[in-house]
Each structure stands twice: as C-alpha cells, then as structure tokens.
Amino acid sequence: MRLRFLLPAAGVLLPVRGVVAQSTPVADIVYRNALVWTGDSARPSAEALAVRGGRLVAIGRDGDVQPFIGPTTKQVDLGGRRLVPGFIDAHWHLPTASRADLVGAGNVQEIVARLQRWAAKLPKGAWVVGRGWTPSDFPQNAAHKRYLDAAFPDRPVLLTDRDGHQSLANSVALRLAKVTAATKDPAQGVIEREQGGAPTGLLKESASGLVSRLVPPPTAADIARRIHEESRAAASLGNTMVHEASRRAPRGAVFEALAAAARADTMTLRWYVSVPFDPNATRAQLLHYVQLSKQFSGPWLRYGIAKGMLDGTVDAQTAAMLEPYANTDATGLPFWPAGTLNRGVVRYDSAGLQVELHAIGDKAVRMALDAYAQARKVNGVRDSRHRVEHVEVPSPRDLPRFRQLGVIASTQAIFATPDVTTLTNYAPLLGPKRAALSNNFRQFDEAGAVQAFGSDYPVFPMDVIRGIYTAVTRLTPEGTPKGGWYPAGRISVEAALRHYTRDAAYAGFMETEVGMLRVGMLADFVVLSEDILRVAPEQLLRVKVERTVVGGREVYTR
C-alpha cells in the first residue's frame, strides 16, 4: 500500500537559508546565479544548486554550494535566469502512427490540400490518414464523406478529429470496412447517417474502430523512433515526465521499447504508463497489472495506474451531460452503467491500483466520483489518489467532493483556449451557463482540490508555457477575445506552475522524488529565458525554455 505524504500549502516567495546534505561530496555540476523557484513552500527560493549522481545535494545561495565544488565539478552560470522544477505533463499520449497534420486547417479546401501533399509521398493505394480536424473546419460544423470523395475517389482516407473521439472516412474506406446502412452502431459508438440510413462517413467513439482496424499498424522500428522523437520534443518544452494515458495493453512494441530503454538506462523522459481499466477484467489481469507496478517502479518507468473512458467529448456531443446539449435532445453517451462502473472501480481499488477515468460531461464526472465513493465505502479509506481526467464541465455541486474523496482533478490548461471551435461549436453546444464554468481552473483551486495539469497531447501541443499563458489569460495566442474568455476562471502564474510540477508529481505518487527542488530529490529542472513570475501575463508566450535537466542529465539546451 502506498503511504500518504501531505503537501504543504503554497507560500510566498521569500529568501531562504541554504540547505545542504549532511556530508559534502563533490558535485558533478553546480548551477549558480539563478532565480530559483523551488516549489517548496517551506523554502521557496534560492540562487544555486548542486547535483551529484542525478540528485540535488545542495540548494541555497551561491556561497552555500561552494563546499561542493571540486576539481572535476562543472560550473554553470545561469546569468540570473529563472529556474523552476521540471514540468510534468499529467495527461499525455504517445502518437505511434505517422499522419497528415490537419491542426488549424480552418476549412475543407485546406484539409484536402494537406492530404494531397501527404498522399503524394505514399505508395500508390496506401491509406491516407490524418489527424487534427475540428467541426468548425466544415460547413455548418458537419463533417461529411463528400468532402473527401472528390479528391480521393480510389484510395481509402480516414481522418481523426483533434480530440481523437470521432473520425471521418471516405466512401472507399467505408466500402473496404463493409460499413453500410445495414451496419448496426457498435457498443459505445455511433455511425452518423443520412435520413435513409446511409453512413455520412462520420464515426463517433468506438465506431471509428470499424474502419481504423484496417489501417496498417506502425512497425516496431517506427515506434522506437517515435518514442525517441517525442522524448526530444518533450524536453525542448521543459517536460521531464509524462503520465501516458493511452491505456494500451502492457505488451507489444510500445511496452517492449519502453522496458528496454529503462533497463538500458537510456531514457531522457520519465514515464508513468497506464494499463486498461475494464470493469470486467479477470482476476489474472488485475494480478498482472499489480505485478507490473512492482516490476516497473523506478524513477524512469512506472506502472500502477489504470485508464478508463467514461464518456466522449462536447464537440462530438458524446460527453455525458445531466441536461441536454443546447437546442437538442442529446445528453451524450455514458460508456458504462453506474453499477458496472462501480463494481469495476471497487475491484481495481481493492487490488491497490490507481484509477483515472476520462469524464468530461457533468453526468460522467458525477458517475466517476460516485464510483470512487463506493470504493471507499467497500474497501475503506486509503491513499488511492484516483483521478478524473479532463473534468471539463463539472456540476458546481460536485466540486467539494474532490477534496472530500481525495480525488485528483486532472485538467488541461490549454483546453481553455477560446479558438474558433470553442466559440462556434463547443460553447454553443453547452449554452452560456455551462460554458462559463467549463475548463474553469480557479473553481478547483477554490474547492481545495489537488489539480494536476496536462496537455492531452497530441490533441493539443505539450507546450507548458502556452498552457500557463492560457490558464492565466484565457486568451488565444493572438490575444483574443479582448478581456479573455470567461475571465473569472483565470489563475495566477504561480498556481499554474504548481499544477504542472508539485501537484502533477503528487498525482503520480512521485512527490517525494520530483515536482519540487529539495535536497535528496531528483535533479529535474528547467531554465527559462525570462522570469515567468514577473513577465506581464499577455507577454508570457515570449518566455522560452533554455535548458532542461532530467536526473542531472542535460537533455535539452536551446
């Protein structure tokens, strides 16, 4: 059973006395002349730190690290730059397939143009796959196969939307998959249809699998390369750890590649990897997941969390809502009955596994909290730290329950971006009352919940600085709309930093190792080009990551 470590309350930034280890071993490297935000409210600021063997052996004023400097110690003068704990992305996905990038296309013509450029590089007849479209890219916010058929009359096309919860297939792809008017909707999925029953090409939730199963999977070499590339990209944005939420079965190329890298000690990014949450999992499966959490419990690769999907998304109208979407009779698509969900959570909790449930709509969020309450009732109170992922549209009535039940609010700061899809599809579907409280991060802080920030990459960029900017300003990168989108939901820069570091570490049972800068903890930190705590909010995007250090290893230098 995991032990509970209480987090100290946030404090003001004040000068502190130096803190050093009891002995004074020679440091491998010393960083001096910095503005250090430690994330540790007991000792919030410093000027220098010393690293040995991947851990912090001293932190304090410049003079405090002097005893740790020997003839082999490397010294780095940071020129007064801001240094913060390494960023932790608490909700992240490893993209394994190579696809056309449709993010920000804006219209059908641009989508087709990007796909044609992509297809020109592929063998004749190969599947054309892409990701990143949004409903606002299509006329009347309605994706349809006719927009693809003219450009690709003889090869299959499958496009996943930005959120990953609906796909658009052309007629060739539907024909290959044998999806017709007679095809029934699969469990937890919807085939959108014309009035006569013919598929429109839009496939929601599990219905996407009817076609995606035919797309050739990436090779083991492809996956190993993607892990390397994505780790480098993460480091360039200051990420030192990710909570991988793809709920893959722990076998196959991804599992083997990560395990091999951990054994070889060649990782540059820490991973906390989810297994599938299935209410009907066998006892043998649960025992296997528990064994994995014991086998992989080191600082670079860890298991012990199970990811489940409880509903869909607002944009697809599959997020489960207590009241219908505006101007519709639709209330979304809960994936499990409450009784089935509750029994499953009780079983995973009894096995000592952490559970994270994707729940976006207020009905799904309530169902998740009810399931966690049932686990407490049946199994007793323990330090489970179960999580609700995304929790975009919670009922105000349920906010206090996060603290009461010890449940983590795993939110995504960048989701509050008021882009065209948010303003023309997402918000109108919710209506003004619910939209005003959606992706409102202040309400979780005021309710006393532990809130861990992530990106949901590749749904949105894993750019922490942009996430902080969004949480603080509720503006697009272009600075719109004037005054911010429902600005009452804004939080401070320091609060956002805390959610990306200390709180995210706590959400992954790593708060004694990472998320703060304290003697004895792992040396994970980021050096920024400017003082993020003093830059005007509207200027936050000019802050760049200068250097990323993970376990004392400099994995990125600008």
Image (cartoon, grey):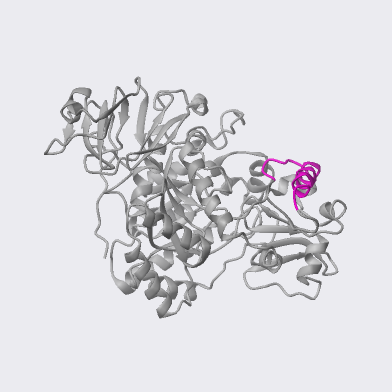
Residue 544: image location, x then y, percent: 48, 29
What residue is at 19 percent from the left and 34 percent from the top? 26
Quadrant in which the N terminus appears: bottom left
Q: Nearer the viewer, residue 14 or 164?
A: 164
Q: Nearer the viewer, residue 151 or 4?
A: 151
Q: Is 419 above or below relative to 146? A: above
121 magenta-colored: yes
Res 305 visible = yes
Q: Is residue 50 left or right of residue 189?
A: left
As drawn, which residue projects farthest toward the front?
71
Residue 134: image location, x then y, percent: 69, 48
As drawn, which residue projects farthest toward the left?
22
Q: Indicate the quadrant where residue 9 lies.
A: top left
What residue is at 51 percent from the left and 51 percent from the top? 227
Residue 78: image location, x then y, percent: 35, 23
Residue 451: image location, x then y, percent: 40, 48
What residue is at 77 percent from the left and 54 percent from the top? 123
Boundaries of the magenta span: 102-122
Q: Is residue 422 left or right of residue 149?
A: left
151 magenta-colored: no
